[in-house]
């Protein structure tokens, strides 16, 4: 007998038929003799609908900051509905089950409403209830803050609820059911020969966030990594008894290291800013970074180049596309203090990255990457690297081509592990 946590995302509980289907998948695990906790998201689209209601009311007045404690009370309601519905569906199948809201467990968080962090999960009630043969159906995404109010864990937060619950319950498995059958070497809509990975290391999963973000909330991967809890990502569309291995996100092992690159990710949410004719003095980049952090803008890739005239430099960096206006305004204000002549910006850029823990032990990855791009005449504007990742900034027009060419250059269509 094992203790398992099963998590179902919005499309997996999108309507009563899907919820009935989930109840069959849960029943199969109970019949196999396991103790089961199920974490559910809201029906797909429901959280967006609730957020839009809050926004609409907020926009009628201009009272400043959003009212986040009430936001949490509203947007957490979608999970209350699905946890109750699934509990009914399970009981109608003759299983013992009950729903649990965040505050009933209790799943305690800090007071950062709308993006709360989990502080502690008590299992003094839920654990014994499961040991008595009850399926625990837990509303994901929500908890109770120190102030006694409902809190939510940020969009996509039910993944984190599931992993945290698995850790608290000392579960043997944490299975995240979703609408794709695992993590792929790249976006299958772009590269037709993209393959499902059997296993992927926690660190790679974090770097592949742009591929996986829709599948797993980043924080859930960090939490699983810190507690060494493997997560299996698999589809909820399969029938009971189907072969459905999914992708295991786990600690790295030797087979993963043999693979030089595990995946190619891309992000179109980038914008590039270039400051021209900067006074090339110590502290100049620091001033730029300070201006950005004071404006609440995260700077990602940075490159400094020499300008044509003496003692001047050009500085290029990237920010999130949604922050571009904010960044440009803040730079304009600091123009004299930073000491540059002109600003150029471009939001028609894409960051393409190759990721793999194998890079630590294999050489020539950068060469393969740049040759493959050059072969197709794709110009690289900015480069950034980490121990397990190389990212390049390119013109968005070449996104699909670059992804396909890199997928091929690293022979990812052959990946089997
Ligand atoms: N329903 C919440 C959201 O859409 C939480 C989740 O699904 O993980 O963000
Ligand atoms: Mg999700």
Image (tube, grey):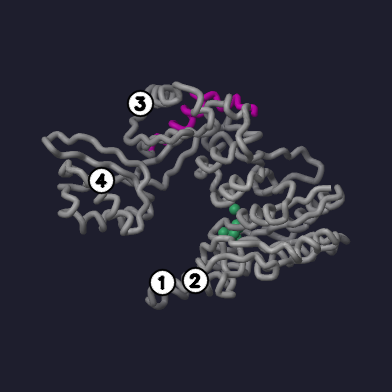
Q: Earlier in the sequence, mark 3 or mark 1?
A: 1
Q: What stretch is highlighted in magenta?
A: 397-417
**Are the residues flagged by discs 3 and 1 in contact, CB closer than 8 Å?**
no
Q: Which of marks 4 and 3 is in front?
A: 4
Is disc 1 surrounded by few (<14), some (14 to 19) or many (20+) residues within 10 Å?
few
Cα gap from disc 2 to disc 1, whole angstroms: 8 Å
Q: Which of marks 3 and 2 is nearer the N terminus?
A: 2
Q: Nearer the viewer, mark 1 or mark 4?
A: 4
Please, what secondary structure does the residue beneath circle 4 have?
A: helix
Determine the residue positioned at 70% across, 48% down.
Answer: 174
Question: How far across and down, in percent of the image, does residue 156 sit?
Answer: 57, 56
Identify residue for label 2.
68
Q: Which of marks 3 and 1 is in front?
A: 1
Q: Earlier in the sequence, mark 4 or mark 3?
A: 4
Residue 285, label in figure: 4
Identify residue for label 3.
377
**Residue 83 as seen in the image, left or right of residue 64:** right
399 is within the stretch colored magenta? yes
Determine the residue positioned at 75% across, 50% down.
Answer: 4
Cα gap from disc 1 to disc 4, whole angstroms: 31 Å
Location of residue 64 with respect to 157 vertically, above or below: below
Please, what secondary structure does the residue beneath circle 1 have?
A: loop
Q: Can residue 400 be seen in this view?
A: no
**Residue 104 as seen in the image, left or right of residue 135:** left
Residue 65, label in figure: 1
Location of residue 362 with respect to 46 vertically, above or below: above
């Amino acid at each position: 007998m094992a203790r398992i946590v099963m998590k179902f995302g919005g499309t997996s509980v999108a309507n009563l038929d899907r919820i009935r289907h989930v109840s069959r998948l849960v029943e199969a695990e109970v019949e196999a003799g396991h103790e089961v906790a199920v974490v559910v998201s809201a029906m797909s689209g429901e959280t967006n609908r609730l957020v839009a209601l809050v926004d609409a009311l907020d926009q009628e007045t201009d009272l400043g900051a959003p009212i986040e404690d009430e936001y949490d009370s509203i947007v957490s309601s979608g999970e209350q509905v699905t946890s109750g519905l699934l509990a009914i569906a399970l009981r109608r199948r003759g299983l013992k089950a009950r729903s649990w809201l965040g505050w009933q467990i209790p799943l305690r968080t800090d007071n950062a409403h709308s993006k709360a962090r989990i502080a502690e999960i008590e299992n003094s009630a839920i654990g014994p209830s499961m040991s008595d043969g009850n399926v625990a159906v837990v509303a994901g995404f929500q908890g109770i803050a120190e102030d006694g109010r409902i809190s939510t864990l940020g969009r996509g937060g039910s993944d984190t609820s599931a992993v945290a619950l698995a850790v608290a319950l000392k579960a043997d498995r944490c299975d995240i059911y979703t609408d794709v059958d695992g993590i792929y070497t790249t976006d299958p809509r772009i590269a037709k020969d993209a393959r499902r990975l059997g296993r992927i290391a926690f660190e790679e999963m974090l770097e592949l966030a742009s591929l996986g973000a829709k599948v797993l909330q980043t924080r859930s991967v960090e939490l699983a990594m810190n507690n060494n809890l493997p997560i299996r990502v698999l589809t909820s569309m399969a029938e009971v008894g189907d072969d459905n291995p999914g992708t295991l996100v786990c600690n790295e092992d030797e087979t993963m290291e043999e693979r030089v690159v595990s995946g190619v990710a891309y992000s179109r949410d980038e914008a590039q800013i270039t400051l021209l004719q900067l006074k090339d003095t110590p502290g100049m980049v620091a001033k730029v970074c300070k201006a950005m952090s004071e404006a609440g803008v995260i700077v990602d890739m940075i490159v400094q180049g020499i300008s044509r005239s003496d003692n001047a430099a050009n500085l290029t960096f990237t920010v999130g596309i949604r922050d571009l206006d904010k960044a440009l305004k803040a730079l304009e204000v600091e123009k004299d203090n930073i000491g540059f002549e002109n600003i150029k910006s471009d939001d028609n850029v894409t960051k393409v990255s190759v990721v793999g823990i194998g890079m630590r032990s294999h050489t020539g990855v950068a060469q393969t990457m740049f040759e493959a791009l050059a072969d197709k005449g794709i110009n690289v504007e900015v480069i950034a690297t980490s121990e397990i990742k190389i990212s390049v900034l390119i013109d968005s027009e070449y996104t699909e081509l670059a992804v396909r060419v890199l997928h091929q250059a690293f022979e990812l269509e052959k990946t089997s592990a």
